[in-house]
Image (cartoon, rainbow, N blue to C red):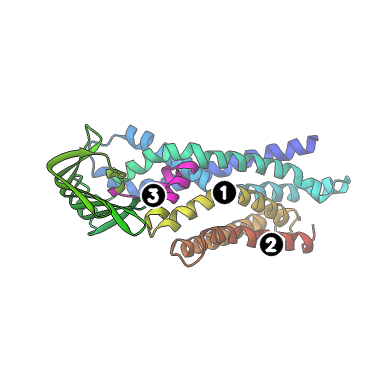
Amino acid sequence: MRIIDKYILKRFLTSFVFVVLIIMAVIVIIDVTEKIDDFNKHPDLSVSQIVNQYYLNFIAFIANMITPLTTFIATVFVTAKMAGHTEIIAILSSGVSFKRLLFPYFIGAMIIASLSFVMTGWVIPKSNKERVQFEIDYTKNTFHYNQRNTHIQVAPNVYLFLETYNNQTDNGNKFTLERFEGTSLVEKLSARKLSWVDSLQKWRVKNWQHREIDSLTETITEGLEMDTTLAIHPKEFKSNYRNFDGMTLGELNEHIETLKLRGANNVEVYEVEKYTRYSAPFAVLILTFMGVIVSARKSRGGTGLQIALGFFLSFIYILFFVMSKTLAEAGSMPPMLSIWIPNLTFIGISIIMYRYIPR
C-alpha cells in the first residue's frame, strides 16, 4: 500500500467516524425530546437505566443501521475536500489512474462493510433485546393479545387451537391439540382451561380429555388437571414489537421457517429484515463508488455544492429503500427483490456516471 493510499484511507475512516458521531448526536437529541414525557411517567426509572439499558444500545443500533449513508457522506466529504485542494488532479497527473485512486476507498469500505455485517448479524441483536424490552416496558402501551379462535400449526401435522388467551395472566380457554396422519386424526388433547406454570416451565391443562384413534379403535382418557409440555411458549403471545431486532441471523432464519410452517401472514417482515442485513454491506461499497464519482471533480461552486449533492442522493436512496421495503412488507413485492432494487438501481446509476461524467 502506497503512502497516498494510507493518506486517503486514514482521512476516509476518520471522516466516517466523525460523520457517525455528528449524526448520532442529532438523532439522540431528537429521540430524547420525543421520549422525555414517557420517561417522566415512570418515577422509578433512573437516568442510569435510561442510559445503560436504552441509549447505549440505541446508539449502537442506529449507528450501524445508517452505515451505508454515513459512509457515502464521508466519501463525498473527503473526496470533495481533496478535489477542492487540487489533490485529486495532482494524483491523477502523477500517472495514477482513476481506477487505482478508488483502491483505498474500497479498502475502507470493505473494512466498514465487514464490521457492520458482523455487528448486524450477531453482536447488535443481543443488545437489541434489552433495548426493545425497555421500549415495551416504558415507552409503549401495554400489549393485550385480543385475537380469538387462534389456529397454529406447531409442528408437521400438529395443530393447536385456542378460543381465547390472556397474555397478562398466561391463561387460555377451550384448548385443543390435534395430530394427523395424512387426512386422518390420530390423536387429540382438549381442555377447558390452559395456564402456564412458570416454576415448572410447563403448561397446566384442566378438565382435559385425551383421545387416541387407531383405525377403528379409540382410547379416551380424562382428568381434572395435568402438567404437560407443548410446542408453544407464552412469549409467542406477548408483544412482537420489533422482535426481529433481537434475533441473530441464525435465529432469524429459524423463526422464518417456523412462521412458514405455521402459515403466519407476517413472514415478509422477517424476510425483509433478513435480506436487509445481507444487502447493507453491498450498499456500503456501491455508495462509496458513487460518492467518489460525484465529488472527484473540482467544482467552481466549492465543496459545499458537492456535499449538498451527496446529501440529496442520500435522501433519494433512503426514499427508494423505504418505498421498496414497504411494498415487500405489504406482500406486494418479493422481499429479496424489493431489498435489492435500490442497490441495483444505484449501481446502474454509478456505472453510467463513471462512464460519462468527466473526472
Q: Which of marks 2 and 3 is nearer the N terminus?
A: 3
Residue 72 appears anywhere in the view? no
Q: Which amino acid does label 3 sit on?
A: Arg
Q: Where is residue 200 in the image (x, y as percent from the top left)?
A: 23, 32
- Is residue 253 part of the magenta span, yes or no? yes
Residue sitting at x 29%, y 57%: 151
Q: Position of residue 60 (x, y in %)?
A: 48, 40
Q: Earlier in the sequence, mark 2 or mark 1?
A: 1
Residue sitting at x 57%, y 49%: 278
* Numbered circle sitting on residue 348: 2
Q: Which of 232 and 273 is in front in this view?
A: 232
Q: Is mark 3 on a helix, strand or loop?
A: loop
Q: Position of residue 342 (x, y in %)?
A: 59, 60
Residue 258 appears anywhere in the view? yes
**Distance between mark 3 and mark 1 Cα atoms:** 18 Å
Check the picture and name the quadrant holding the N terminus: top right
Looking at the image, residue 171 lies above or below residue 151: above
Magenta segment: 237-259
Q: What element carries label 1?
A: helix
Q: Which amino acid does label 1 sit on?
A: Tyr
Q: How crowded is mark 1: few (under 14 residues within 10 Å), some or many (20 or more)?
A: some
* Numbered circle sitting on residue 278: 1
* Numbered circle sitting on residue 215: none
Query: Which residue is labeled 3 in the image?
Result: 242
Q: Residues within 10 Å of mark 3 (few under 14, many from 20)?
A: some
Q: In this view, does 344 lie to the left or right of 357?
A: left
Q: Which of marks 3 and 1 is nearer the N terminus?
A: 3
Residue sitting at x 13%, y 40%: 225
Instruction: Give the quadrant of residue 42.
Output: top left
Q: How crowded is mark 2: few (under 14 residues within 10 Å), some or many (20 or more)?
A: few
Q: What element carries label 2?
A: helix
